[in-house]
Amino acid sequence: MKGLTCLTAIAAVTLSGCASMAPDYQRPASPVAAQFQDHAAIAGASAKSAQVADLAWKDLMRDSRLQQVVAMALNNNRDLRVAVLDIAKARAEYRIQGADLFPTISADGAENVAKTSAALSSTGKSSISREFTASVGFSSYELDLFGRVRSLKNEALETYLATAETERSTRISLVAEVAADWLTLAADYQHLALAQKTLDSQRETLKLTEYQHEQGVASALDVASIQTSVETARADVATYKAQGLQDRNALELVVGHAIPEALLPKNLGETPVALAAVPADLDSRVLLLRPDVMSAEHTLKAANADIGAARAAFFPTISLTASAGRGSNELSNLFDSGNGTWSFAPSISVPLFSAGGLKASLQESKIERDIAVADYEKAIQTAFGEVADALAVRSTIDERLDAQQALVKVASRAYELADARYRSGVDSYLDALDAQRTLYSAQQDLITLQLTEQSNRITLYKVLGGGADARAEDLSTAQASAATPTSDAGE
């Protein structure tokens, strides 16, 4: 047993002194501008306001109904469930790979019973012999002198971390998608309410005009024009009813569960989504915290570690097999003095000829690393474009809303005047009908613009990597626990 202990200690010391042959990792230079230009700071945001990337989704969603729907999605969405399971799988693979850094020690016990025939026995009589053995040892343990196993372990770690970031990205995207679908449903319900209100108003006007036509005051053209307006509004009501049903189906599909009627919106109402602060001189380095960018970087680090494993394959592989124990022909004196046994069988494998296979494998690893660099740079460029587009919308949305609200106000006043002139007999209903259509269109555009403004808040949360609570677990803690070797006994 002492010999085995010494061998294990020597292996551990040797292992601690080895180093990976992977290239030193250097983060590629960012392929985008240092700052986002041509946008103003978010109005009303103080210097102490929470930044988008630090804003938890529960702080972003002000409407309690929306909060409950998002929570349902986080608990029931199947895509997120698969992403979480992928993390568990990657973590297990990392622990499997990390276990190769340590020898696998096992204890064995055996009894061997054999009968020797009289013809073969030296005494001329048949006999039965017994042999008992008990040993502890390890088999085919590779001394990682050139860092091959350590490089593979680092590759598995980076793959695990990349998977964790992918899960975080899925979580953020799910929150954003649920909120966007919920807001779209609210806007379409508001469109439906406007169309129904317009239809009711037009039907009342039609009754009045038909009466006036019977009295000879209104013309048949006025009646036909109002009937056209009524049927148009009726068609809009049917369209928005169908759209509302489709929106609800889409929302429930994303949530993964039926949504109670009490949690559905009726209209956009008060601002249901908060707006976090975005400074005017927003640094593009904030993109490095986006989960998709971080996942791409971990993938790049994994490819970098794979180069180390490919380089180490050119060097000899040294394996150790050793055991120490006891042997006896009687179980009762198995552990008596003088019955100790041990074995030590080192082996070395030196690559001599592989027909260029090792060089090709190294070249493949380098190409994979170059591909990962390009993917990482593309991820940053895509993120920069998404943020720039969201900021471009945000920079003018308040002005557009103000102008549209003023247009609705003016159109409403114009319709009131035109309708009053028609009712007093000054003008035909064509002028009032034209004013009413202008007002209806302006009101529809205002609802659409309000949806755009609220959706932009969600988009900013998503593209800036928001969600302080979007990470399922502390990765540093997970990494530490995954790296700690544990006994398999009892699992």
Image: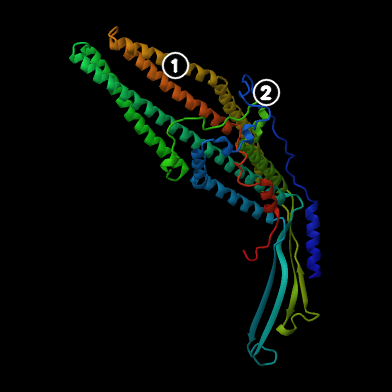
Classify mark 1: residues with Cα within 10 Å, few (<14), some (14-19) or many (20+).
Answer: some
Amino acid tagged 2: Asp
Quadrant location, the C terminus: bottom right
* Towards the viewer: 68 or 70: 68
Quadrant location, the N terminus: bottom right
Q: Please report the residue visible at 63 percent of the width from the left and 45 percent of the height from the top.
A: 159
Q: Please report the residue visible at 28 percent of the width from the left and 19 percent of the height from the top.
A: 205
In the image, which is nearer the foreground, mark 2 or mark 1?
Answer: 1
Q: Badges 2 and 1: C-beta atoms under 8 Å apart?
A: no
Horizontal relation, residue 126 to residue 400: left or right = right
Q: Quadrant of residue 424?
A: top left
Q: Quadrant of residue 235?
A: top left
In the picture of the structure, the residue carrying the numbered disc 2 is: 281
* Towards the viewer: 419 or 40: 419
Task: Kindly identify which numbered label has been placed on residue 9.
Answer: none
Amino acid tagged 1: Lys
* Towards the viewer: 58 or 344: 58
Q: Earlier in the sequence, mark 2 or mark 1?
A: 2
* Towards the viewer: 489 or 199: 199
In the rendered view, would you say 269 is above or below 446? below
Task: Kindly identify which numbered label has been placed on residue 409.
Answer: 1
